[in-house]
Image (cartoon, rainbow, N blue to C red):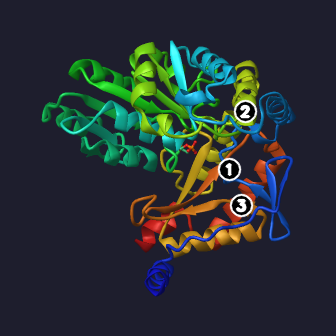
Amino acid sequence: MERLAQELEALEGQALRRRLQVVEEVLPGGKVRVNGRVLLNLSSNDYLGLSQDPRLVAAAQEAAARWGAGSGASRLVAGNLALHEAVEERLAAFKGVEAAVIFSTGYMANVGAISALVGPGDVIFSDRLNHASIYDGIKLSGAALERFPHRDLNRLERLLQGTSGKKRLIITDSVFSVDGDLAPLADLVALRERYGVWLMIDEAHATGVLGPGGAGLAQGLGLTDQVDIHMGTFSKALGSLGGYVAGDRRLIDYLHNRARSFIYSTALPPPVLGAIDQALKIAAGEPERRRYLLEEADKFRRGLAAAGLDTLGSETQIVPVLVGENSRTLEFAQALQNRGLMAVGLRPPTVPPGKARVRFSLSAAHAREDLAQALETIAGLAEELKVSSEQLAVGG
Ligand SMILES: *Cc1c(COP(=O)(O)O)cnc(C)c1O
């Protein structure tokens, strides 16, 4: 234990130590109470505000009343309720593909699918900024990893030319969680076709948010059929919990047989399935929610840029502000919290060294006035703390 304490101290010294913060109450309008104070929550992934939607709560309660609190077993044993099948069918229709399989979390979907689909002798091409669960899946798979710089298609193509393997798989997030930018999906599809490789996309931050029906970036670009493996989560814009993989019927049958995080874990419980089912209905039927979210995000981003702040390549509801140093990033995040705004400071290893940032995540639950007020507060504090991009450049 003394050893562990020393390691924690070392983290403290680099301003890398993390601590849990307690949310004492969840309030309407995307607000929370922390340490007795009401804060505008600009850190959640509840992009459509569905986690607090009374219709999801009621659907969860009804499913629990009808089916129970738990599913009792894994899917292949005795836990495969008609409810699971119904939700997967709705999901496949929502995604515009043949079939889908639900995992207990998005993390488990990535780890299970990647390690099932490729193995030793195969090669995975992964964007440097892909989510940690993708990297954990790659490690578990035993396939060779070729990591390419963020969105660098030239580099990716050279790697594709320089490798061979039984199976080759390109994996990318569709919306990147630390920069809020988009994968160059049309170009990735072109490479998939030119080199005859699989393409997998993780739509965790895009499900419910992008595309005319809310299915994600692939749908938005009309490229659903050109992506082999669609992955995503119900834990973000869809407001509850669970991960999914969607695509060809044969892919899904294969995962039922080979994805260990699906096979050896208990099936999702009925209340969660009830909430997912309701969230899919709302996401498909109420496009005005994502329209409001993306319009407000656009305004917010332009406001920050006008204040001289660097929002990196953000094009979505995820809007980072580059600070640079770890300790200054924490200072900025703390100052924001003191003024009623909850936003996380992201530090290495989540981001590259020297690229620490404060990240703002917007939600359709946020009122226009609250976002306008937040923008003013952020710009004012950034000036006080000298966070603007010119000041960074001068200071090196
Ligand atoms: C959040 C996230 C996951 C994990 O999803 P959970 O359902 O929270 O486990 C996977 N990939 C990306 C890109 C994510 O942002």
- Is 246 situated left or right of 337 in this image? left
Q: Quadrant of ligand 1?
A: top right
The response on whether ligand 1 sits within 8 Å of label 3 is no
- Which amino acid does the dot numbered 3 rest on? Met
Image spot of residue 8 (x, y percent): 49, 79
Counting other residues with Cα less than 10 Å from the Cα at mark 1, is it few (<14), some (14-19), or many (20 or more)? some
Residue 386 at least partly seen: no
> Which residue corresponds to the image point at 62% horizontal and 30% vertical from the top-left?
79
Residue 120 at least partly seen: yes
The response on whether ligand 1 sits within 8 Å of label 1 is no
Q: Earlier in the sequence, mark 1 or mark 3?
A: 1
Image spot of residue 31 (x, y percent): 81, 53
Image spot of residue 313 (x, y percent): 48, 45
Q: Which mark is residue 270?
A: 2
> Which residue corresponds to the image point at 47% horizontal and 71% vertical from the top-left?
325
- Residue occupied by mark 1: 44
Q: CA distance from mark 1 to mark 3?
A: 9 Å
Q: Which mark is residue 369?
A: none
Q: CA distance from mark 2 to mark 1?
A: 24 Å
Q: Is label 3 in a helix, a strand or a loop?
A: strand
- Which amino acid does the dot numbered 2 rest on? Pro
Image quadrant in which you'd find residue 62 = top right
Q: Is label 1 in a helix, a strand or a loop?
A: loop
> Which residue corresponds to the image point at 27% horizontal and 18% vertical from the top-left?
193
- Residue occupied by mark 3: 342
Q: Nearer the viewer, residue 253 or 123?
A: 253
- Which amino acid does the dot numbered 1 rest on? Ser
Q: Nearer the viewer, mark 1 or mark 3?
A: 1
